[in-house]
Image (tube, helix red, strand yellow):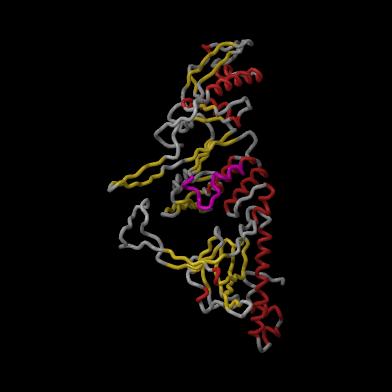
Amino acid sequence: MGVAGSRAFDNGKFIVSLLGTLWDMWFPDKDTVVGIMTARGEPFWQVYLDLLDLVACKSRLNIPIFQRRYWHLFTVLESQKDSGVQVCNLYDTTGLTYQNANKPAYGDKENSRFFSYAIDAEIKDVHAVYNRVIDPSLIWMNNADFAVDADRGIISFYTDPFENALVPKRDVLDSTGTVVDREIALWLNFSSVDLQYVYEQFGYALGIWMESSTFYKDFISAIWDSLVLGPSQTSLKFAFAALAGIPFAKETETVVTIIDESPVYKHVETDKNIYTFKASATVIVDIGQELTIGDPMVSDLLFFEPTASLTAFPGIAIDTNLMRSIGLSGPIVFDNDDMTVDYIGLDINDKAIVQFGVSGFPTDVTKFWANVHKEGVLKGVTMADALDTRAVLISPTTQADLPATVNPFNFAISHIFLNNMYLVYVNPLAFADGAPGLGSLDMLYPFLSPHTTYVIFVAIQQDTDYYTVGDQSDGLDFFKGTTISERADNFAVDIGPTIRAIPGRCR
């Protein structure tokens, strides 16, 4: 068939016109020919859709997430039905409250029965259900007449299809001819079928598999950008955006035109795109503001370049996997606070030994400073040389040549991590539904830029629980973490388990 178009193959009159004037104009039973050609054209519509998918799969930017299956025959036995009841808490019912913490509460669905059946595991969604392909007399629409739960692999009808006279059904007989069951046949129209397009085309080459989704597609695309175009902060941002479901601006020279907020979502519209966020996200842009590629629009996913001006961070812990193996048992913490610079003296090579306050296990701190001086001597730049305030180092450093104090956090940022590390702030409460989340970060790590890493600050929110003792009710606030409100070395002492109550919350 050399002619293709939107729904052309199921248009019997169109196909008949291609057969010639005899069948189109003079054959007496033209309706029969139209019906036959319509039926013959149905399978070609799926071929046409598959051809479009084949072309789109050549590009990681245009590859579809799921296959569009025009018709899928769905047969099921009545004995396989799993019906249930949803109970609603209606107004004027005694014992209900508006407080979410005290169940039951108002607002659930009305009393209704649904009828559930298993569907093929690769079917993730269904547009409509028909009782037959040609001239259907019954059409059920998604979310109005049925719902698909892809995670559980079931389709739930709001009315029993076995009791509908328009649904074709047949009796199932045993060896004696006795009716033991019934079977129905329905047609699922435009099913979304998961054939692992993204993984089979691009993900396999990177060794990265996730559940098929737009998040997975965007994550793979960000990784390919990093490999093909070279690693950059933009590709890292887009990788994090895919994991969190919190987008950054995708275009340059774009302007915010509309900010739309509702109880269930927030939209930021520009002159080139529209971005959707959860209702819990905090928008930080204004109408008329100019954006460029990679700019954040909400405060729930932010990137910081390490600079000495990052006063909001209490410090940074450098773990053993970021340092040469010197036998440390834990991290060394560089606090964001002024520490006294200690002049220890000269070594046997007349090199000044200088230290300042860092946190960690005492034995680890001793090993750390010993290794710092050793490596500095080998490389020709000791800690004393780095802190020496003289313009020209013409003699060994003395105590008078040193500053009185130094900020360890700022020193680490400016001398170690500048251009080598990103600080990432994330708020999991604003992550999009279905996003892979931070649990998939191990898939990103192998594709980081050489000699770079990132530190993630996760916003941990407080939970509130309620209790009742007698006739008294009250709430308890639970914090899932603590601030670094004291020097870290107060905790990093190897004296066994210690329990301490510290007010505050994690950053």
> What is the quadrant of residue 442 in the picture?
top right
Residue 248, image x, y percentages: 53, 46
The residue sitting at 32% across, 47% down in the picture is 468
- As for residue 155 lying within the magenta part, the answer is no
Q: Tell me where the magenta segment starts and ends, as one range.
A: 428-444
Q: Residue furthest bottom?
A: 28
Q: Which residue lies furthest to the left in this view?
A: 471
The residue sitting at 42% across, 53% down in the picture is 261
- Using the rendered image of the protein, determine whether residue 464 is visible from the camera's viewpoint: yes
The residue sitting at 43% across, 42% down in the picture is 461
Residue 343 sits above or below residue 480 on the image: above
The residue sitting at 63% across, 38% down in the picture is 449
Left or right: 356, with 90 as reference point:
right
- As for residue 438 lying within the magenta part, the answer is yes
Residue 86, image x, y percentages: 43, 64
Is 166 or 417 nearer to us in this picture? 166
